[in-house]
Image (cartoon, rainbow, N blue to C red):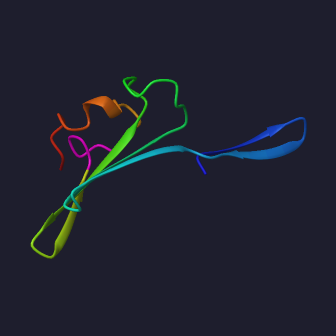
Amino acid sequence: MLENSDINRQKYSVEPYIITEDLSGVTKYTATSISFNDASKLIWKIKKEWKIDNIWYMGFPNGEQDFKFAWTGRTLYTYK
């Protein structure tokens, strides 16, 4: 859950939008956002996972885990 809010004394939770792309079982991208208006907007937190031999690694664009990246640019970022 990304957010808990109180509207008219009723609590609710916002489920995040999640996009996942698996490339040949070796590279996987996962993005999370609270809005799915546009995959090109800078509202996504993106994680990349990649496999070398039998070890899986993960990283984030520039090492940052903020909601400020575009899903459409996922393959262009440098992951740390």
Query: Which image quarter: residue 50?
Result: bottom left
Magenta residues (range): 60-65
Q: Which residue appears at 21% of the width and 57% of the height? A: 24
Residue at the far front: name it.
Answer: 24
How many numbered marks are there? 0
Residue depicted at 25% across the width and 30% down the height = 73
Foreground pick, 32 / 20: 20
Q: Is residue 67 left or right of residue 2?
A: left
| 6 relative position to 40: left or right | right
Q: Residue 66 at what x, y percent from top left?
A: 38, 39
Residue sitting farthest toward the left: 53
For the point 23% across and 46% down, the residue is 63
Residue 62 among magenta residues: yes
In the rendered structure, the answer to whether residue 75 lies left or right of residue 65 reads: left
Against 38, is 32 above or below?
A: below
* View extreme (bottom): residue: 54
